[in-house]
Amino acid sequence: MEYHFPAIGLVPIVRGSGDEGRAAVIGINPPEEVTPEASLIEGEEKRGIGLWMRDRYGVLRELKEKRVKRGWVEGMEEGLFVNVGLEEVVEKLVRWDGGISGNEWFSRMEDLPWYSSGDIL
């Protein structure tokens, strides 16, 4: 969630600070005898959070391939999320390709209906 929430505007982004936003998540790791912690961390860095750090919208090769293995077809978002009553900016977000580098922030984050700048009123 540390990388997913900022990517869709659910937590504020401080651009240029290296701070990707903060989201508190409580989870339970499997027992040590089932999956040793070192193995769990290594796996997450290679196939989990490590991938999302470099590809926040899941559009580059490795995460794109993971989606295909799970039955995702290119353009599927058009049928699922476009012309179903969502705001135009939300439709643009679900079709966002990560910009030139594939890992750029969505350019209209502040226009999302749920976006919060983090300012306390």
Image: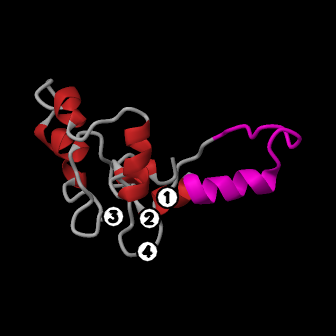
Circles 2 and 1, Cβ within 8 Å, touching? The answer is yes
Q: Which residue is mark 3?
A: 103
Please, what is the three-letter code of the amino acid marked with disc 4?
Ser
Please, what is the three-letter code of the amino acid marked with disc 2?
Arg
Please, what is the three-letter code of the amino acid marked with disc 3?
Asn
Residue 36's spot in the image, x, y percent?
83, 49
Of the residues tagged 1 and 3, which is closer to the observer?
1
- Residue 26 in sight from this viewpoint: yes
Above or below, comparing residue 80 to residue 66 in the picture? above
Q: What is the distance, in whole Å, between disc 4 and disc 1 at their CAs?
A: 20 Å
Circles 2 and 3, Cβ within 8 Å, touching? The answer is yes
The residue range painted magenta reads 26-47
Q: Which residue is mark 2?
A: 54
Q: What is the distance, in whole Å, between disc 2 and disc 3 at their CAs?
A: 7 Å
Q: What is the distance, in whole Å, between disc 4 and disc 3 at their CAs?
A: 16 Å
Question: Which comes before the other along the chain, label 4 or label 3?
Answer: 4
Residue 90 is left or right of residue 58, and the answer is: left
Residue 86's spot in the image, x, y percent?
17, 30
Q: What is the distance, in whole Å, between disc 2 and disc 4 at their CAs?
A: 16 Å
Circles 2 and 4, Cβ within 8 Å, touching? The answer is no
Q: Which residue is mark 1?
A: 51
Question: Which comes before the other along the chain, label 2 or label 4?
Answer: 4
Of the residues tagged 4 and 1, which is closer to the observer?
1
